[in-house]
Amino acid sequence: MTNTFLFEQIKAKASFLCVGLDIDLEKIPPYLLKEEDPVFSFAKAIIDSTHNFTVAYKPNLAFFESYGPKGWSAFEKVIDYLNTNYPDHFTIADAKRGDIGNTANRYANAFFKTYCVDSVTVAPYMGREAVEPFLRFKDKFAILLALTSNKSADDFQYTKENQQPMYEKVIKTSLNWKNSERLMYVVGATKAEAFLSIRKLVPNSFLLVPGVGVQGGSLTEVADNGMNSQCGLLVNSSRGIIYASQKNDFADAAAYQAEKLQKEMQILLKSKGLI
Protein backbone atom coordinates (compact mmCIF):
# COMPACT_ATOMS: atom_id res chain seq x y z
CA MET A 1 0.00 0.00 0.00
CA THR A 2 1.20 3.53 -0.73
CA ASN A 3 0.66 6.80 1.12
CA THR A 4 -1.39 8.01 -1.83
CA PHE A 5 -3.71 5.00 -1.73
CA LEU A 6 -4.08 5.35 2.03
CA PHE A 7 -5.08 8.98 1.62
CA GLU A 8 -7.65 7.96 -1.00
CA GLN A 9 -9.18 5.60 1.55
CA ILE A 10 -9.20 8.35 4.17
CA LYS A 11 -11.09 10.63 1.80
CA ALA A 12 -13.49 7.90 0.69
CA LYS A 13 -14.44 7.01 4.25
CA ALA A 14 -14.01 10.46 5.77
CA SER A 15 -12.00 8.72 8.47
CA PHE A 16 -8.45 8.29 9.70
CA LEU A 17 -9.41 5.75 12.34
CA CYS A 18 -7.33 2.69 13.18
CA VAL A 19 -8.94 0.02 15.36
CA GLY A 20 -6.52 -1.74 17.69
CA LEU A 21 -7.13 -5.44 18.21
CA ASP A 22 -5.93 -5.98 21.79
CA ILE A 23 -7.90 -9.16 22.37
CA ASP A 24 -8.16 -10.40 25.94
CA LEU A 25 -10.16 -13.59 26.44
CA GLU A 26 -11.12 -12.41 29.92
CA LYS A 27 -12.98 -9.45 28.40
CA ILE A 28 -14.85 -10.99 25.49
CA PRO A 29 -18.45 -12.27 25.81
CA PRO A 30 -18.45 -15.71 27.50
CA TYR A 31 -20.39 -17.39 24.70
CA LEU A 32 -17.45 -16.84 22.33
CA LEU A 33 -15.22 -18.98 24.53
CA LYS A 34 -17.10 -22.00 23.20
CA GLU A 35 -15.87 -21.25 19.67
CA GLU A 36 -13.00 -23.26 18.20
CA ASP A 37 -10.96 -20.06 17.92
CA PRO A 38 -12.50 -17.40 20.21
CA VAL A 39 -9.76 -14.84 19.49
CA PHE A 40 -10.40 -14.95 15.76
CA SER A 41 -14.18 -15.09 16.22
CA PHE A 42 -14.08 -11.93 18.33
CA ALA A 43 -11.72 -10.15 15.92
CA LYS A 44 -13.82 -11.10 12.90
CA ALA A 45 -16.99 -9.73 14.51
CA ILE A 46 -15.23 -6.47 15.40
CA ILE A 47 -13.82 -6.10 11.88
CA ASP A 48 -17.14 -6.84 10.18
CA SER A 49 -18.98 -4.32 12.34
CA THR A 50 -16.45 -1.46 12.11
CA HIS A 51 -14.90 -1.68 8.64
CA ASN A 52 -17.09 1.07 7.20
CA PHE A 53 -15.71 3.56 9.71
CA THR A 54 -12.03 2.75 9.74
CA VAL A 55 -9.09 2.67 7.33
CA ALA A 56 -6.72 0.51 9.38
CA TYR A 57 -6.51 -2.35 11.87
CA LYS A 58 -3.70 -2.92 14.35
CA PRO A 59 -3.43 -6.38 15.93
CA ASN A 60 -1.34 -6.09 19.07
CA LEU A 61 0.99 -9.09 18.89
CA ALA A 62 1.36 -9.44 22.66
CA PHE A 63 -2.32 -10.32 22.97
CA PHE A 64 -1.94 -13.03 20.34
CA GLU A 65 1.45 -14.36 21.43
CA SER A 66 0.20 -14.81 25.00
CA TYR A 67 -2.05 -17.67 23.79
CA GLY A 68 0.81 -19.62 22.24
CA PRO A 69 0.41 -21.48 18.94
CA LYS A 70 -3.36 -20.88 18.97
CA GLY A 71 -2.74 -17.16 19.30
CA TRP A 72 -0.31 -17.11 16.39
CA SER A 73 -2.82 -19.07 14.33
CA ALA A 74 -5.50 -16.53 15.21
CA PHE A 75 -3.21 -13.65 14.17
CA GLU A 76 -2.57 -15.32 10.81
CA LYS A 77 -6.30 -15.86 10.30
CA VAL A 78 -7.05 -12.22 11.18
CA ILE A 79 -4.56 -10.93 8.61
CA ASP A 80 -5.76 -13.40 5.96
CA TYR A 81 -9.35 -12.36 6.66
CA LEU A 82 -8.50 -8.68 6.26
CA ASN A 83 -6.41 -9.19 3.13
CA THR A 84 -9.13 -11.30 1.53
CA ASN A 85 -12.28 -9.44 2.55
CA TYR A 86 -11.08 -5.89 3.23
CA PRO A 87 -7.92 -5.48 1.14
CA ASP A 88 -8.22 -1.68 1.09
CA HIS A 89 -7.62 -1.51 4.84
CA PHE A 90 -4.10 -0.79 6.07
CA THR A 91 -2.78 -3.51 8.39
CA ILE A 92 -0.33 -2.87 11.22
CA ALA A 93 1.43 -5.62 13.13
CA ASP A 94 2.01 -3.93 16.47
CA ALA A 95 5.07 -6.02 17.31
CA LYS A 96 7.60 -3.38 18.43
CA ARG A 97 10.49 -5.42 17.10
CA GLY A 98 14.02 -4.10 17.47
CA ASP A 99 17.07 -6.25 16.81
CA ILE A 100 19.95 -6.27 14.32
CA GLY A 101 21.49 -8.33 11.52
CA ASN A 102 19.90 -11.60 10.49
CA THR A 103 17.38 -11.30 13.32
CA ALA A 104 15.95 -8.05 11.97
CA ASN A 105 15.86 -9.52 8.47
CA ARG A 106 13.96 -12.55 9.75
CA TYR A 107 11.46 -10.37 11.57
CA ALA A 108 10.90 -8.34 8.41
CA ASN A 109 10.50 -11.46 6.27
CA ALA A 110 8.06 -12.93 8.78
CA PHE A 111 5.70 -9.99 8.78
CA PHE A 112 5.99 -8.85 5.18
CA LYS A 113 6.43 -12.19 3.37
CA THR A 114 4.83 -14.79 5.63
CA TYR A 115 1.98 -12.79 7.14
CA CYS A 116 1.67 -10.12 4.40
CA VAL A 117 0.93 -7.14 6.63
CA ASP A 118 1.37 -3.58 5.37
CA SER A 119 3.46 -2.33 8.29
CA VAL A 120 5.24 -3.24 11.52
CA THR A 121 6.00 -1.15 14.59
CA VAL A 122 9.75 -1.07 15.23
CA ALA A 123 11.86 0.11 18.19
CA PRO A 124 14.81 2.33 17.14
CA TYR A 125 17.08 1.92 20.18
CA MET A 126 19.59 -0.27 18.31
CA GLY A 127 19.78 2.18 15.42
CA ARG A 128 19.92 1.87 11.66
CA GLU A 129 20.62 -1.89 11.62
CA ALA A 130 17.42 -2.59 13.51
CA VAL A 131 15.20 -0.66 11.10
CA GLU A 132 16.61 -0.73 7.57
CA PRO A 133 15.79 -4.44 7.05
CA PHE A 134 12.11 -3.48 7.32
CA LEU A 135 12.58 -0.75 4.71
CA ARG A 136 13.66 -3.15 1.94
CA PHE A 137 10.08 -3.90 0.94
CA LYS A 138 8.30 -1.76 -1.61
CA ASP A 139 4.92 -0.40 -0.47
CA LYS A 140 5.52 -1.66 3.07
CA PHE A 141 6.25 0.49 6.11
CA ALA A 142 8.16 0.42 9.36
CA ILE A 143 6.41 2.49 12.00
CA LEU A 144 9.13 3.84 14.26
CA LEU A 145 8.50 4.43 17.95
CA ALA A 146 9.23 8.12 18.37
CA LEU A 147 7.16 9.70 21.15
CA THR A 148 4.85 7.29 22.91
CA SER A 149 1.74 8.00 24.98
CA ASN A 150 2.73 6.21 28.20
CA LYS A 151 3.76 8.16 31.31
CA SER A 152 7.25 6.65 31.59
CA ALA A 153 8.09 7.81 28.06
CA ASP A 154 9.75 10.67 29.94
CA ASP A 155 12.46 8.27 31.17
CA PHE A 156 14.28 8.45 27.82
CA GLN A 157 12.30 10.18 25.10
CA TYR A 158 12.59 13.70 26.53
CA THR A 159 16.28 13.39 27.46
CA LYS A 160 18.02 16.34 25.82
CA GLU A 161 21.27 16.53 23.91
CA ASN A 162 22.26 20.01 22.73
CA GLN A 163 18.75 21.17 23.63
CA GLN A 164 17.20 18.56 21.34
CA PRO A 165 14.96 15.95 22.97
CA MET A 166 15.73 12.33 22.19
CA TYR A 167 12.52 11.72 20.24
CA GLU A 168 13.43 14.53 17.84
CA LYS A 169 16.95 13.10 17.41
CA VAL A 170 15.44 9.68 16.63
CA ILE A 171 13.23 11.15 13.93
CA LYS A 172 15.94 13.38 12.47
CA THR A 173 18.48 10.54 12.38
CA SER A 174 16.02 8.16 10.75
CA LEU A 175 15.68 10.46 7.75
CA ASN A 176 19.24 9.51 6.73
CA TRP A 177 18.47 5.79 6.58
CA LYS A 178 18.04 3.96 3.30
CA ASN A 179 14.43 4.03 2.03
CA SER A 180 13.40 6.40 4.83
CA GLU A 181 10.38 7.38 2.75
CA ARG A 182 8.94 4.05 3.93
CA LEU A 183 8.94 5.18 7.54
CA MET A 184 5.94 6.19 9.61
CA TYR A 185 6.18 7.28 13.24
CA VAL A 186 4.36 6.56 16.49
CA VAL A 187 3.44 9.81 18.25
CA GLY A 188 1.13 9.61 21.26
CA ALA A 189 -2.02 11.72 21.40
CA THR A 190 -1.18 12.60 25.01
CA LYS A 191 1.84 14.53 23.67
CA ALA A 192 -0.20 16.80 21.37
CA GLU A 193 2.06 19.81 21.98
CA ALA A 194 4.97 17.96 20.33
CA PHE A 195 3.21 17.45 17.00
CA LEU A 196 4.16 20.93 15.77
CA SER A 197 7.92 20.34 16.09
CA ILE A 198 7.60 16.79 14.78
CA ARG A 199 5.75 18.02 11.69
CA LYS A 200 8.67 20.34 10.93
CA LEU A 201 10.94 17.29 10.80
CA VAL A 202 8.59 14.96 8.89
CA PRO A 203 6.01 17.13 7.11
CA ASN A 204 4.89 14.40 4.74
CA SER A 205 5.03 11.23 6.84
CA PHE A 206 2.08 9.39 8.33
CA LEU A 207 1.91 9.32 12.12
CA LEU A 208 0.32 6.47 14.06
CA VAL A 209 -1.36 8.08 17.04
CA PRO A 210 -2.33 6.00 20.10
CA GLY A 211 -3.77 7.50 23.25
CA VAL A 212 -7.09 9.00 22.12
CA GLY A 213 -10.00 7.95 24.30
CA VAL A 214 -9.17 5.86 27.37
CA GLN A 215 -5.72 7.47 27.76
CA GLY A 216 -7.17 10.97 27.50
CA GLY A 217 -5.64 12.33 24.29
CA SER A 218 -7.55 15.01 22.39
CA LEU A 219 -8.51 14.19 18.80
CA THR A 220 -9.00 17.87 17.99
CA GLU A 221 -5.56 18.85 19.29
CA VAL A 222 -3.94 16.00 17.37
CA ALA A 223 -5.64 17.11 14.14
CA ASP A 224 -4.88 20.79 14.66
CA ASN A 225 -1.19 20.16 15.34
CA GLY A 226 -0.48 17.06 13.28
CA MET A 227 -2.61 16.93 10.15
CA ASN A 228 -0.89 17.55 6.81
CA SER A 229 -2.04 17.83 3.18
CA GLN A 230 -2.68 14.06 2.99
CA CYS A 231 -4.16 13.95 6.49
CA GLY A 232 -1.01 12.12 7.60
CA LEU A 233 -2.64 10.65 10.69
CA LEU A 234 -3.84 7.23 11.73
CA VAL A 235 -5.51 7.66 15.10
CA ASN A 236 -5.80 4.40 16.98
CA SER A 237 -8.51 3.39 19.41
CA SER A 238 -8.44 -0.05 21.00
CA ARG A 239 -10.25 -0.59 24.29
CA GLY A 240 -12.69 2.25 23.74
CA ILE A 241 -14.07 0.46 20.67
CA ILE A 242 -13.57 -3.28 21.03
CA TYR A 243 -14.69 -3.37 24.69
CA ALA A 244 -17.46 -0.78 24.43
CA SER A 245 -19.63 -3.68 25.58
CA GLN A 246 -18.60 -7.04 26.99
CA LYS A 247 -22.04 -8.50 26.41
CA ASN A 248 -23.56 -10.17 23.37
CA ASP A 249 -24.08 -6.78 21.71
CA PHE A 250 -20.31 -6.13 21.66
CA ALA A 251 -20.07 -5.85 17.86
CA ASP A 252 -22.90 -3.32 17.63
CA ALA A 253 -21.42 -1.34 20.52
CA ALA A 254 -18.03 -1.33 18.78
CA ALA A 255 -19.64 -0.10 15.56
CA TYR A 256 -21.37 2.69 17.47
CA GLN A 257 -18.13 3.91 19.02
CA ALA A 258 -16.22 3.62 15.74
CA GLU A 259 -18.89 5.60 13.89
CA LYS A 260 -18.87 8.22 16.62
CA LEU A 261 -15.14 8.76 16.14
CA GLN A 262 -15.51 8.67 12.37
CA LYS A 263 -18.09 11.48 12.51
CA GLU A 264 -15.68 13.60 14.55
CA MET A 265 -12.92 12.87 12.05
CA GLN A 266 -15.17 13.81 9.14
CA ILE A 267 -15.71 17.25 10.68
CA LEU A 268 -11.96 17.71 11.17
CA LEU A 269 -11.15 16.60 7.61
CA LYS A 270 -13.73 19.03 6.24
CA SER A 271 -12.36 21.86 8.36
CA LYS A 272 -8.93 21.26 6.82
CA GLY A 273 -10.37 21.16 3.28
CA LEU A 274 -9.31 17.55 2.72
CA ILE A 275 -12.77 16.24 1.80
Image: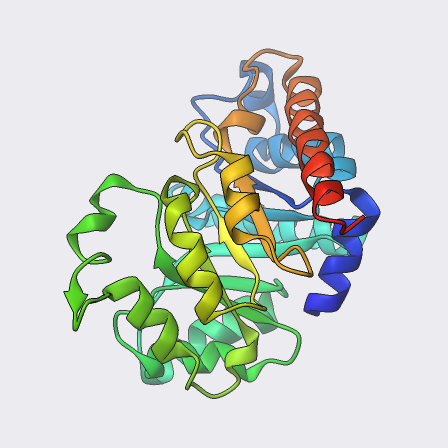
**Is residue 156 something one can see in this rendering?**
yes
x 48%, y 74%: residue: 108
Q: Position of residue 219 (x, y in %)?
A: 54, 36
Residue 30 horizontal side relative to residue 85, left or right:
left
Give the residue displayed 16% in from the left and 52% down from the top.
155
Task: Check the image and tell me how it is coloured.
Answer: rainbow
Q: Quadrant of residue 39?
A: top right
Residue 149 position, x and y percent, is: 35, 44
Give the vertical position of 186 relative to 250 (above or below). Answer: below
Q: Give left or right: position of 175 versus 275.
A: left
Q: Residue at x 54, y 42 (%)?
A: 236
Query: How far across and down, in percent of the image, does residue 226 sit?
Result: 53, 52
Residue 162's quadrant in the figure? bottom left
Count of marks placed on residues: 0
Viewer can see residue 124? no
The residue closer to the viewer here, 69 or 167, is: 167
As displayed, is residue 14 above or below residue 145? above
Image quadrant containing the N terminus: bottom right
Q: Nearer the viewer, residue 221 or 105?
A: 221
